[in-house]
Image (cartoon, grey):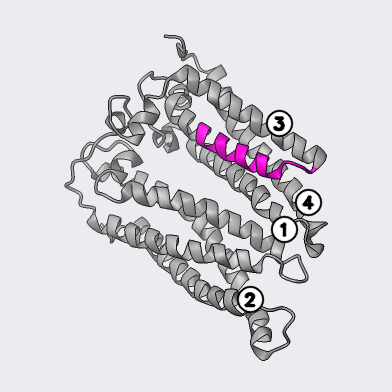
Amino acid sequence: MLQHPAIIALTGASILICAMVLYAGGYGIRILRRWDLSSGSEAQLSLERRTYLISVIIGYALFFQVLSLFLYIYTADSLHPLFVGAMCAAGSLNAVPFGYAVLVLKTVNCLLAGSWLIMNAVDGKGYDYPLIRPKYALLLLLAMLISLETALQITYFGSLKADVITSCCGSLFSGGNRSIAGELAGAPVLPTMLAFGFCLAACMTSGVVFLRSGKGGYLFSLSGSLFFLAAVTSLVSFISLYFYELPSHHCPFCILQKEYGHIGYALYASLLGGEISSLGVGLLAPFRDRPSMMEIIPRVQRKLTIAAIAFFALFTGIAVVRACTTSFTLGVFG
């Protein structure tokens, strides 16, 4: 199975990204221990010269790390015809252990990588590298998580065998299945709808308040994360039903397929984009009072807030338009 072209490409890219991040992480340890901008020593000058190059290289690496989440899901979906019982990526990921563990790690690393890219962009605008220590501390965490992800991904793909019988998405995402997927699918529709609406309203309101007053950045970041969780739950619980027009099909992967116009990619990209943007607002908040950042960070936070609102609105808009244009109806009180 490791000879599959998509697997070769994804595995090669993951190993390269891992190697680059580990190298930068080692360099980051030196920065955390020895960085002193007030020093004119040769060691400090060497750190300053190399940090720009390292940041540029890692910036590209982490950008591809974000994209690798979608490539991983696409690869898993393309493999499903090879397994008996699989109908989409859900079956491929369940064919052997580690498939879903890699998906969770890639999602976490996608959010952290996006957050690091925001911090790196802002740090480059300051004359005194004000975010360099927290930026490289986050990079060290990313280095460990990406290394674990790469190891598990290689193990997962290396364990795949074409004669494996796996479960279909209908059984995995079923209310009767005692698992996280089953719990999400079996979440009561009306309370989930209300939670979705409340989290959306809280996110949008806190975002508007922050844009008007410049206060409440942490609250907006928190409300964005709560909406992200509510949206994921809602997608499995009831949003997906409107796309499939079936009352029992809760799979979050089938909407990635051609039959549904690959709309799942737009849903997930908008949701992840909104979460990364809202996280960035909170991550930058502790540094906005630093002299070199007093004008830069508030401006960047405003842009991130607008981006987060736009992304979350796009996700909600796609779901609402589909619910309003399909003949399928969902009895929320039944």
Examine the rendered structure and indicate whether residue 130 appears above or below residue 237.
Answer: below
Mark 1 secondary-structure assignment:
helix
Tell me which numbered mark, 1 or 2, is placed earlier along the sequence: 2
**How many residues crowd mark 3 within 10 Å: few (<14), some (14–19), many (20+)?**
some
Task: Indicate whether residue 262 is drawn in magenta.
Answer: no
For the point 63% across and 39% down, which residue is it? 311
* 3 vs 1, front mark: 1
User: In this figure, which residue is indicated by the disc labeled 4?
Assistant: 298
Task: Tell me the quarter of the picture where residue 85 sits.
Answer: top left
Percent coordinates x, y for residue 246 in the rendering: 38, 19
Tell me which numbered mark, 3 or 2, is placed earlier along the sequence: 2
Mark 4 secondary-structure assignment:
helix
User: In this figure, which residue is indicated by the disc labeled 2?
Assistant: 51
Q: Which mark is residue 287?
A: 1
Amino acid type of the residue that numbered disc 2 sits on in the rendered structure = Thr
Percent coordinates x, y for residue 275 in the rendering: 58, 43
Question: Which residues lie in the magenta part?
Answer: 214-230
Check whether the beta carbons of the residues at disc 3 and disc 2 lie within 8 A of each other: no
* Label 4, label 2: how far apart the Cα atoms are: 25 Å
Q: Please state which of residues 68 and 286 is positioned toward the viewer in this rendering.
A: 286
Amino acid type of the residue that numbered disc 3 sits on in the rendered structure = Thr
Task: Tell me the quarter of the picture where residue 184 sits.
Answer: top left
Q: Please state which of residues 95 and 206 is positioned toward the viewer in this rendering.
A: 206
**How many residues crowd mark 4 within 10 Å: few (<14), some (14–19), many (20+)?**
many
Q: Please state which of residues 318 and 258 is positioned toward the viewer in this rendering.
A: 318
Residue at the bottom extreme of this rendering: 42
User: In this figure, which residue is indicated by the disc labeled 3?
Assistant: 205
Tally the marks: 4
In this view of the protein, can residue 322 be seen by the observer?
no
Amino acid type of the residue that numbered disc 4 sits on in the rendered structure = Pro
Tell me which numbered mark, 4 or 3, is placed earlier along the sequence: 3
* 4 vs 1, front mark: 1
